[in-house]
Amino acid sequence: MSGLAEPGLAEPGLAEPGLAEPGLAEPELPILIEDDLQELYELRALDRPALSPPHPPDPRIDNIYQRFDAPRWRERGAREGFPELLRTLSSIPLSAVVPPVVDASSPAASPSFEASNTPAVLRNAMSSWPCFASAGPWSFRSFLARFRGTMFRFSDTHGGMLAFETYYAYTRSELLGLADDSPLGIYDSEFGDDEPTKALADEYSVPPIFSPDIFHLAPAPHPPYRWILLGPARSGTGLHIDPLWTNAWVALVAGKKRWLLFPPKTPPALLGVEPGKPQVNSSIWFQDNYDRVTSEDWPEEFRPHHVLQSPGEIVFVPNGWFHLVLNLEESVAVTHNYACEDGPFERMYDDVVENEAEFAGRWREALKEKRPDLEERLRKWEREKEERGAGAEEATYSSALGHKTNV
Ligand SMILES: O=C(O)CCC(=O)C(=O)O
Ligand SMILES: [Fe+2]
């Protein structure tokens, strides 16, 4: 919890260009105390498994910022390299593959992107959302006013949490978030479940263009399916495939996001992904790999689809596609994953049995009752598997040690 700093220890809050929000008074910057820095230190260490091991805080150093500021948060120089990366990523190369733009408000709009399992960008699906359209839309500033003292989660994998004001102060600190190679981002699948964040779930709605979620044929609880994402420039999500063969949509409320999505047949090793290796932060991945994956030598069939996402746009992420996202500006987004009947249903079921065993039983019961056609497909699949003998398991790359891992 933030409170009063010891004399002489508070870092003055430094305003960065681009952070001003018209219509909202500049809030007083919460001051971090030693306990906050300890918490931040621990969360940063949990969140960056791909970096060198953390040094324990050195008690002999009496400047508390330096004591907790292991050089590892800056070791890849992503902050220094960011202006150039930003210039590169702020436009899409002329030769790049870009997903089709779908006007979700048009009566002719169809979810053909689900059937073809290809990325798409939807426009005009968020205009009536209170979080986006009316007074008090979601932003770092409005969250500070609403959620002082509320704990937010930073990952499904490690479950680390911080009070919002501590996080807010971190994102505005020259010595902390503004210096990090890949700043911490809120990645919370429990928002909306209980007070005080319950109201947030009513401030947007699932666009009707997406198919119903067949996991939701079963009663709650369901595997995690909705997340709120808040992160400053240079934060984001490293390369991963979403879990359980689900599709996803990501709606941007504020900021700017840069995406690459790779067709499912892309060999993971070509993207630097190996089972068991921790996820690389997206700012570092872009810095190290963008030129290679956009060069003329990159195989045609593995060419990435590029998106530069603006507020009001929704990116559709098809199941089985590797993707990564970098926040080019401070961003606020909401995302849902959903189990689509058009997807690889049988493989999805096997994945659910393996990773969400308790849910699998309840889901199967629900399918029996409400979708006997799908249940029959599973019986057939099971008969075929028995005839074949248990096949070799496919490696799964859904987030490995990153976000959206089922734990
Ligand atoms: O916008 C982001 O950082 C991540 C979106 C995403 O791919 C996910 O949540 O799985
Ligand atoms: Fe994802």
Image: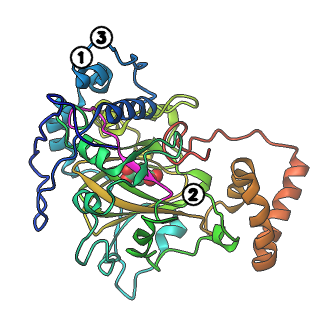
Q: Residues within 10 Å of mark 2 (few under 14, many from 20)?
A: some
Q: Position of residue 104 (x, y in %)?
A: 37, 79
Which residue is tagged 1?
A: 62
Which range is magenta? Answer: 178-190
Q: In the rendered view, does 335 fall on the left or right side of 372?
A: left
Q: 392 and 141: which one is in front?
A: 141
Q: Amino acid at mark 3?
A: Arg
Instruction: Determine whether the residue tagged by mark 3 lies in a helix, strand or loop.
Output: loop
Which residue is tagged 2?
A: 224
Q: In the rendered view, does 83 fall on the left or right side of 145?
A: left
Q: Position of residue 331 (x, y in %)?
A: 27, 55
Q: Earlier in the sequence, mark 3 or mark 2?
A: 3
Q: Position of residue 282 (x, y in %)?
A: 35, 39
- Say which residue appears at 33% left-offset and 51% top-offset: 164
Q: 267 and 205: which one is in front?
A: 205
Labelled pair 3, 1 in contact (Cβ < 8 Å): yes
Instruction: Determine whether the residue tagged by mark 2 lies in a helix, strand or loop.
Output: loop
